[in-house]
Amino acid sequence: MLRRLLLNASDSPRARHFTENSRMARPLVSRFIAGDSLEAALPVVRELVQDRYVSLDHLGEFTTDDSIVRDAVTLYTDVLDKLADDGIADRVELSVKLSSLGSALTRDAFPATLAAAQEICAAADAAGTCVTVDMEGAGTTDLTLSVVRELRRDFPKTGLVLQAHLRRTESDCREIANSGTRVRLCKGAYQHPADAVYSTREEVRESFRRCLSILVSSDTYPMVATHDPRLIDFAAGLAARTKCGRGDFEYQMFYGIRPAEQVRLAAEGAKVRVYVPFGTEWYPYFMRRLAEHPSNLFFLLRGEGPA
């Protein structure tokens, strides 16, 4: 119930205004967000790549203005230039939401959204890295899969995200199993119609296990995006049983969540990538992280630090 309330609040202008202007929220926001600007986020990225990898995300979604789409493309190319100048582009991929590239602007947004994504992918390729296209909320799955399919024609390293809480995801995994795609498998934090998703945590875990088993047994490159100890252990055991080497998959975790576990896995030789968001449009992302870890809400309301 609390999770659904928090997800509903992510779309509430009143809740957004309150949270963005609350001093109590800042400790938690700074836990999950690397900074308001690239300049603020870069020191975090430089530190993380000493022993891990990074997926860098400029926050912003559901853009409704063509000029903002153009600004997003320019920002991402600037990010890639700075990463290349620092010599760390090969350890930092970009995570890109299609809704930040205008996928919600019109009914037929596919050509313009694809063109913007192609421009970012071309810049990433020139810098020596690649892009993973994020999956978003209800009604976006087929569009996202179609865009990624087109992107991979010229940029085969382009990755996609699949959400285990969706009932359709097991079928999607089977469909792309022999495509060689980089696939970030996560539980999922966006709202969908009730009949489209699994309703309990254990059902989602079981779906995650089934989907990951399909990916590991195929020629995809699985990116295991979870903080759940049971699923981390399952992934390690599955890799051992299938003789999937440490270079054949990676773990992914959010910036600010279980950092000690990230360090432990990396120290043991696993490839670990940290999802690092930055930017001023942090509110929807922040609310989804609270929805995943509702205990943090009580610390926020008491004005204390994060859990």
Image: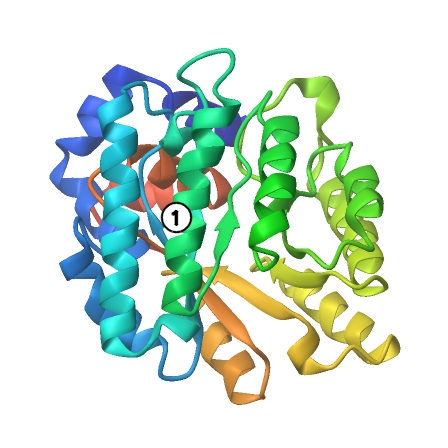
Tell me, yes or no, if residue 34 can be seen here: no
Instruction: Give amino acid for label 1.
Output: Ile
Instruction: Check the image and name the residue furthest to the top.
Output: 107
Residue at 84% from the left image edge and 80% from the top image edge: 243
Residue at 46% from the left image edge and 43% from the top image edge: 118
Tell me, yes or no, if residue 217 can be seen here: yes
Question: What's the coloring here?
Answer: rainbow
Other-residue count near label 1 (Cα within 10 Å), few / some / many at <14 / 14–19 / ≥20: many
The image quadrant of residue 270 is bottom right
User: Would residue 241 be found to the left or right of residue 201 on screen?
Assistant: right
Report which residue position mark 1 lands on. 120
> Foreground: 208 or 150?
150
> Foreground: 139 or 18?
139
Please say if 155 is above or below 165.
below
Please say if 196 is above or below 262.
above
The image quadrant of residue 276 is bottom left
> Foreground: 80 or 211?
80
User: Would residue 199 be found to the left or right of residue 57 on screen?
Assistant: right
Residue at 82% from the left image edge and 55% from the top image edge: 178
For mark 1, give the secondary structure. Answer: helix
Looking at the picture, how far across and down is residue 18, in whole percent? Answer: 19, 25
Looking at the picture, how far across and down is residue 225, in whole percent? Answer: 58, 57
Looking at the picture, how far across and down is residue 5, in whole percent? Answer: 46, 23
Image quadrant where one finds the C terminus: bottom left
Residue at 77% from the left image edge and 54% from the top image edge: 179
Please say if 149 is above or below 136.
below
> Foreground: 88 or 286?
88
Instruction: Check the image and name the residue furthest to the bottom.
Output: 268
Instruction: Check the image and name the residue furthest to the front.
Output: 154
Please say if 134 is above or below 256.
above
